[in-house]
Image (cartoon, rainbow, N blue to C red):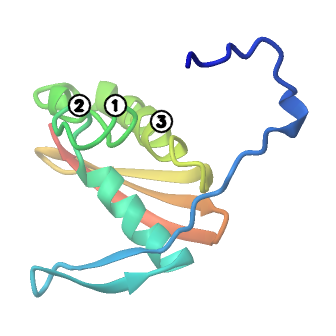
Amino acid sequence: MTPKQVTDVDMSRITKKKLPSLTWKIDREEGQVRGTLDEAEAMRQAVEKILQTERYRFVIYDWNYGMELDDLIGKNASFVIPELKRRIEDALLADDRVTAVTDFHFSQERDSVAADFLVHTIFGELRAERTVDI
């Protein structure tokens, strides 16, 4: 038996399914995965994981997950600050639960740049930060 070829698809009947936000809780202090998180707390953990994962490095994640930071090492802060803003937005907006990333504030130390910003999600707003070595 050969499969039938689908030629006409009624796109109005196709619905996009939202995935649940329920996920495992990462307990960094104990070094364990224990319990579960949902909605706002799950989102807080997801944002943290996205910001800490180097994009393209781990085959377990698709190429839209994480952010590229390694190539910023050795660059001038005047280049890093706008590029870091763009990369944070790109990384977080890849998650369909994130609606916007705003209110960026940057500070520069001797060998690093820190970004503090507001992440707007379908579960509310949360403050996040990311520091990169330069």
- As drawn, the residue found furthest toward the front would be 1
Q: Residue at x 32, y 52 (%)?
A: 51
Q: Residue at x 82, y 22 (%)?
A: 9
Answer with mark 1 or mark 3, whichever residue precedes in sequence. Answer: 1
Quadrant housing residue 118 = bottom right
- Horizontally, residue 95 falls left or right of residue 134, namely right
Residue assigned mark 3: 90
Residue assigned mark 2: 56
Q: Quadrant of the C terminus?
A: top left
**Which residue type carries mark 3?**
Asp
> Between marks 2 and 1, how big is the CA–CA gap?
6 Å
Element on which disc 2 rests: loop
Give x and y (percent) for residue 122.
Answer: 67, 64
Give x and y (percent) for residue 69.
Answer: 23, 36
**Which residue type carries mark 2?**
Tyr
21 up-or-down from 84: above or below: below
Q: Quadrant of the N terminus?
A: top right
Residue 1 numbered tag = none
Quadrant housing residue 121 = bottom right
Residue assigned mark 1: 63
Give x and y (percent) for residue 25.
Answer: 31, 79
Give x and y (percent) for residue 109.
Answer: 19, 51
**Which residue type carries mark 1?**
Trp
Element on which disc 1 rests: loop
> Between marks 1 and 3, how big is the CA–CA gap?
12 Å
Q: Residue at x 13, y 31 (%)?
A: 73
